[in-house]
Image: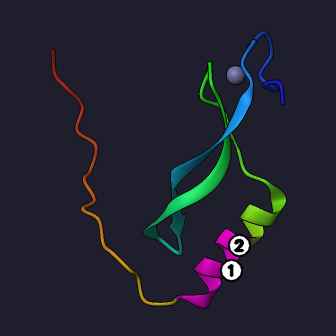
Amino acid sequence: MKCTIRDCTGEYETRYIVHTVRHKGKVIVIDNVPAEVCDVCGDVLLLPITVCALERILTRRKRAVRTAPVYEYERVVA
Ligand SMILES: [Zn+2]
């Protein structure tokens, strides 16, 4: 499928991405999420069924399979 970003000539291809959301103030990371990613600009589309699956993961609140370090952004002073 052609990219939906104006003037982008890329095509979406299925890739497995790391999806990060802020849920009730907490950062949640979901790994291996199938997504359509533009091969030129990197625009990411999630299919409605994938969005449903992500919501289900957030609401079921199962124990996390892995944890990841979270860093606060620090601006580089030139
Ligand atoms: Zn694109």
Q: Amino acid at mark 1?
A: Arg
Residue 58, quarter of the rendered image: bottom right
The answer to which quarter of the image holds residue 69 is bottom left
Identified by mark 2, the residue type is Ala
For residue 56, the mark is 1
x, y (%) of residue 13? Answer: 69, 35
Q: Is residue 38 left or right of residue 4?
A: left
Can you say which quadrant of the picture contains the N terminus? Answer: top right
Residue ID at (25%, 53%): 71
Q: Nearer the viewer, residue 54 or 27?
A: 54
Q: Main secondary structure of the magenta part?
A: helix
Q: For mark 1, give the secondary structure.
A: helix
- Name the one closer to the observer, 37 or 58: 37
Residue stretch in magenta: 53-61
Task: Tell me the quadrant of the picture where the C terminus can be found.
Answer: top left
- The picture places residue 59, in percent across and down from the top left corner, at 63, 85
Image marks 1 and 2: residues in contact by CB distance under 8 Å: yes
The residue where tag 2 is placed is 53
Tell me what residue is drawn at x 30 percent, y 72 percent: 67
